[in-house]
Amino acid sequence: MAETLISYLQYPFVRNALIVGVLIALCSSLLGVTLVLKRFSFIGDGLSHVAFGGIAIASVLNITNDMLVVLPVTIISAVLLLRTGQNTKIKGDAAIAMISVGALAFGYLLMNVFSTSSNVSGDVCTTLFGSTSILTLSSWDVWLSVILSVLVVLIFVLLYNKIFAVTFDEDFAISAGTNANRYNLLIAIIIAVIIVLAMNLVGSLLISALVIFPALSAMRLFRNFKGVTICSAILSVVCALLGMLISILAGTPVGSTIVAADVVAFLVCHIAGKFITGAK
């Protein structure tokens, strides 16, 4: 098995997939802690459905580089979700459900009515659940993922204190002079970028797992924000790397294998957390 793995790693496309997958997992875990604590976990799920709609539009318009359509559409939707979620008439969870279901329905409708492919069902399944497209990344895709991932990590590190304040006590942060709306908007834009990057890795229906599971797993073991964030990042990277390696060796779907690894990690952390609590 080790020899097989080493032989696969000699191919540039495998190395590119591992690099991009690890970076996406790292970025997802950083913002995941904040989203879980703010009870806005399903924004990832909602935006992933919007990204599916963007892919459908790009497909209908025969745009080769769908990122040019998907990224701005998803970012605009993230801003709308944030604004709508602050509306007293439409709460956050209702806003997510409204936008995500609508985008998913219209995306599927467009792909059927204006189909340019003879295998619409296969294209839809690939987009929803991921495929081997992570193994066919172009140099442009790799560099874009690297640049955006580095940008996300830098923003999180440089604005860590502000994000921490807005996450735990938004009212106190506002009273202390922090522009909470600005930082909430920044968080929404960053998670939109991460969602778009993760589409090729796990598919639109499984993206929220990258955001939620590492954060929830880390919370079983730690009780402080920094500890949870660091543990979440480590778990997410390890699960993504392990999932991709198993997928390459066993021929299983990349996205589903990564999510399965995240689920196993959560169960292990949950059991370990019980023992730690009992020992105290």
Image: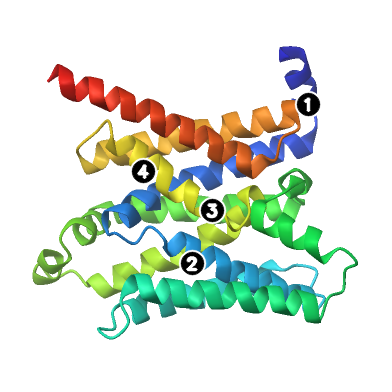
Question: Do tag 3 and tag 1 residues touch (Cβ < 8 Å)?
Answer: no
x and y, in percent, of residue 247 in the image: 69, 32
Q: Which residue is at the far bottom?
A: 89
Kindly identify which residue carries mark 1.
8
x and y, in percent, of residue 118 in the image: 91, 67
- Disc 2 and disc 1: Cα gap in Å? 35 Å
Label number found at residue 46: 2
Q: Quadrant of the C terminus?
A: top left
SS category of the residue bearing label 1: helix
Tell me which numbered mark, 3 or 2, is placed earlier along the sequence: 2
Tell me which numbered mark, 3 or 1, is placed earlier along the sequence: 1
Tell me which numbered mark, 2 or 1, is placed earlier along the sequence: 1
Judge whether 216 appears above or below 199 on screen: above
Question: Do tag 2 and tag 1 residues touch (Cβ < 8 Å)?
Answer: no
- Disc 3 and disc 4: Cα gap in Å? 14 Å
Query: Coloring scheme of the render?
Result: rainbow
Q: What's the residue type where badge 4 is placed?
A: Ala
Residue 149 visible to an observer of this rendering: yes
Q: Quadrant of the N terminus?
A: top right
Q: What's the residue type where badge 3 is placed?
A: Ile
Kindly identify which residue carries mark 4.
215
